[in-house]
Image (cartoon, rainbow, N blue to C red):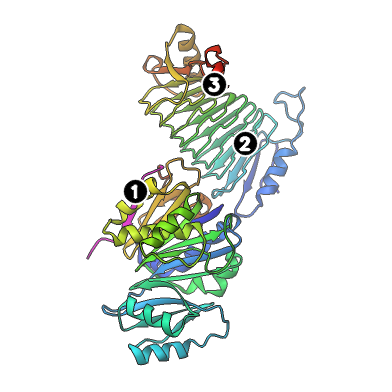
Amino acid sequence: MAVGSGLEAAEFDLAVTPLRDLNAALHGIEKDLASAHGLAAGVPRHWRVLNPRGAHALAVGIDAPIEVEIEGHAGYYCAGMNKEATVRVHGNVGVGCAENIMSGKVIVDGNASQSAGATGRGGLLVIRGSASARCGISMKGVDIVVQGSVGHMSGFLAQKGTLAICGDAGEALGDSIYEAHVYVRGKVADLGADCIEKELRDEHVQELSALLERAEVDAAVEDFRRYGSARKLYNFDVDNAGAY
Amino acid sequence: MCGIAGLFSKSLDVSEGLGSHLGDMLLQLSDRGPDSAGVAVYRDPAPSGSSKLSLFSSDPGQDWDAVRSALDDAFGAGEPEPRGSHAVIVVETECADAQAWLHERYPELRVMSAGQAIEIFKEAGPPQEFIESFGLADMSGSHALGHTRMATESRVTTEHSHPFSTGLDLCLVHNGSLSNHNRLRRRLRDEGIEFQTDNDSEVAAGYLTWRLREGASLEQALEGCLEDLDGFYTFAVGTIDGFAVLRDPIACKPAVMAETDDWVAMASEYRAIAALPGAEGARTWEPEPGRVYSWERAAV
């Protein structure tokens, strides 16, 4: 049950309200494409979640243009499958934050655990702190900006989208990468199979600079290096025919 | 999947409520391990020259006073402190003598831990039942480890539950699974290490026992795991002075750590740490893969 619910704001205190009530309320939001905010009359645009205390599956599966603020640390899969909503976490997040995000924005003030933005298909994930292993694993179109560093195997099998890392990257960056674009400002421990450094051309400067602006990150684009696929691994190469 | 938790007290308040705090953490980890639960609590060190034993009996009517009386005749022994299916007895001799004597006279009893300060309690069944039937809330102490088990590779029994003793005042809890444990168990048996079960985590405990016996420091023994153990693991190891944490280099199994002025904690998930007083303001971080983290009480 929403506490203090009104036209403009809803507040859920998870110390007293079950998590399922929050997610059910979020899933029950009615949209009205004709209205100014795209929401049916009476649906609050701002939602606040208090005392998350590391709960899993917080604010997952939202499909509405609302803003959700989570006041504390979240557990696994926070804001997974997000569509249209902006979810801000004023704390850290556990494994699989914004996994399979479709659109909208997820902003984490603290650090993220493993597999942040995994398989994301669209939208934007911003992590103000650092992310641990496998950030952006199998990303399919999401844009991810990490202001800190990322752990090992980040961008593993990344197919589409952009991963910008303002700090350092751990071992095996971009292993078996497809067509995602990876930018790193700091040091890269080492590159994974079929991932190579590539020239930072004008189009990439523009892409990265627009992304950093969307993420409200102040960093000089020329300090970044670009990494991507050598395209030796996922295309059939006739010279390797004997190996099959 | 399993849940592990460690809590190291830096204040009197946390020490006094240590068991209660650890119980709160384990409750949050019940979903990760509904099959069994266990704890190692470091408290009330036995006097020098004496040793403290945690004994388990599968007989609910076990006469602990009779065991104590026989131990008293042989060596001198304090009053038994029964908890659930276990009892803690302080014996006025070295651990090895007391263990050998028990093995001979009471082969049906299992020594779950031995040392100066360690007490291990573990039991099959849901964590909440364990917390209540072992009176965890009454226990004070300097530091403690806990485990909730979801069995993946061997049976659900008290003996298969964690923590596993790895030597005097040492124990191990494990989240993960090891794939080379059968071969390693054979190798360690050749070195004279004894195993009570076919459990993979007990092999990791046996490995640490062996390395420590051969003169390695705890840090060296843990670093040896990175070479010699194949599989997934987050380990927490309890010592008389503190505890250590290690994750395998691939880091499939989660871990989070946090520290305040009053405590240091590690857990499989943050929600277990959120159960501690002052968690909101704690410095919180994820331990890096393949790196040993350890806390020790400063030597006085």
Q: Position of residue B69 (x, y in %)?
A: 41, 91
Q: Is residue B204 visible?
A: no
Q: Position of residue A203 (x, y in %)?
A: 49, 8
Of A53 and A236, nearer the camera is A236
Q: Nearer the viewer, mark 3 or mark 1?
A: 3
Label 1 amino acid?
Answer: Glu
Is residue B298 in the magenta section?
A: yes
Q: Residue furthest top?
A: A202
Q: Position of residue A170 (x, y in %)?
A: 40, 31
Do the residues under discs 2 and 3 have CB atoms within 8 angstroms? no
Label 2 amino acid?
Answer: Gly
The residue labelled by disc 1 is B223
Vertical order, A234 against A68 (above or below) = above
Crowding around mark 1 (Cα neighbors within 10 Å: few <14, some 14 to 19, many 20+) is some
The residue labelled by disc 3 is A243
Residue at image point 41% right, 42% down: B289
Apparent side of residue B219 relative to residue A106 in the rendered image (left or right): left
Tag shown at residue A80: 2
Q: Are marks 1 and 2 on the same chain?
A: no
Q: Main secondary structure of the magenta part?
A: loop
Is residue B215 in the magenta section?
A: no
Q: Are marks 2 and 3 on the same chain?
A: yes
- Magenta residues span B289-300
Which image quadrant for residue A96?
top right
Work out how far the residue at label 3 is from the one at label 1, CA to CA, in angstroms: 38 Å
